[in-house]
Image: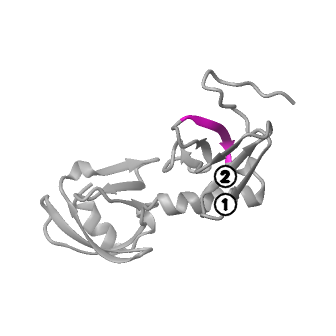
């Protein structure tokens, strides 16, 4: 089957390829034509709103080598390697509970429980809370550049929802 190519040479369907880790732990991509690329970098097109849709594999030169419409198009071993690589690069803790806030005016220090443990973050402005997908999903940017996710505000405990409501 011949797949269409873009002007950059990347394909828009996942072509046959092998993906493995080399002895140094770097991803190695071997395309159907036998060309091998070491140090391949997976990048999600929409990491927050559609994490399983639209993924590119980039070479070390910054050029797209492969476009993957959906992660479920990949074999289980390929998907696992890509997910491992993405997990090492993408770090967006999920807020499970708001423990306290220093002030209801910004900037304020929030003490939160995340899926990675308890931490403090500084919210500079209310605009640093972005509402996604029907206003129940949030992305919160702390002053240090770290981002935190709240997948569903309705799933938070009552005290957390009350604290959060002061900022929304």
Magenta-drawn stretch contains 7: no
Q: Residue at x 73, y 51 (%)?
A: 72
Q: Residue at x 13, y 59 (%)?
A: 107
- The image quarter containing residue 142 is bottom left
Q: In this rendering, would 157 be left or right of 18?
A: left
Q: Residue furthest front?
A: 23
Q: Residue furthest right?
A: 1
Q: Residue at x 60, y 58 (%)?
A: 26
Q: Residues within 10 Å of mark 2 (few under 14, many from 20)?
A: some
Residue 135: x %, y % from top left: 40, 50
> Mark 2 falls on what kind of element?
strand
Which is nearer the N-term, disc 2 or disc 1? 1
Q: Is the residue under label 1 in contact with that under label 2 (CB below 8 Å)? A: yes
Residue 46: x %, y % from top left: 51, 44
Cα distance between the residues tagged 2 and 1: 6 Å
Residue 50, visible in the rendered structure? no
Residue 8: x %, y % from top left: 60, 25
- Most frequent secondary structure within the magenta stretch: strand
Q: Residues within 10 Å of mark 1 (few under 14, many from 20)?
A: few
Q: Quadrant of the C terminus?
A: bottom left
Per the image, the residue denoted by label 1 is 22
Highlighted magenta segment, given as a residue range: 63-70
Q: In this rendering, would 139 be left or right of 101?
A: right
Q: How many marks?
A: 2
Q: Nearer the viewer, residue 18 or 164?
A: 18
Please say which color scheme the image uses. one colour
Mark number displayed over residue 28: 2
Q: Quadrant of the N terminus?
A: top right
């Amino acid at each position: 089957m011949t797949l269409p190519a873009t002007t950059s040479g990347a394909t828009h369907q996942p072509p046959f390829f092998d993906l493995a880790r080399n002895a140094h732990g770097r991803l190695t991509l071997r395309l159907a034509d036998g060309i091998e690329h070491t140090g391949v970098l997976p990048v999600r097109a929409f990491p927050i709103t559609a994490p399983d849709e639209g993924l590119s594999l980039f070479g070390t030169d910054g050029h797209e080598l492969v476009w993957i419409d959906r992660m479920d198009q990949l074999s289980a071993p390929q998907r696992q390697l890509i997910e491992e690589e993405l997990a090492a690069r993408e770090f967006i803790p999920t807020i499970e509970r708001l423990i306290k806030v220093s002030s209801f005016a910004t900037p304020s220090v929030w003490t939160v429980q995340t899926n990675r443990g308890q931490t403090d973050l500084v919210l500079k402005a209310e605009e640093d809370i972005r509402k996604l997908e029907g206003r129940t999903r949030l992305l919160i940017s702390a002053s240090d550049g770290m981002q935190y996710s709240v997948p569903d505000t309705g799933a938070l405990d009552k005290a957390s929802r009350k604290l959060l409501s002061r900022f929304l």
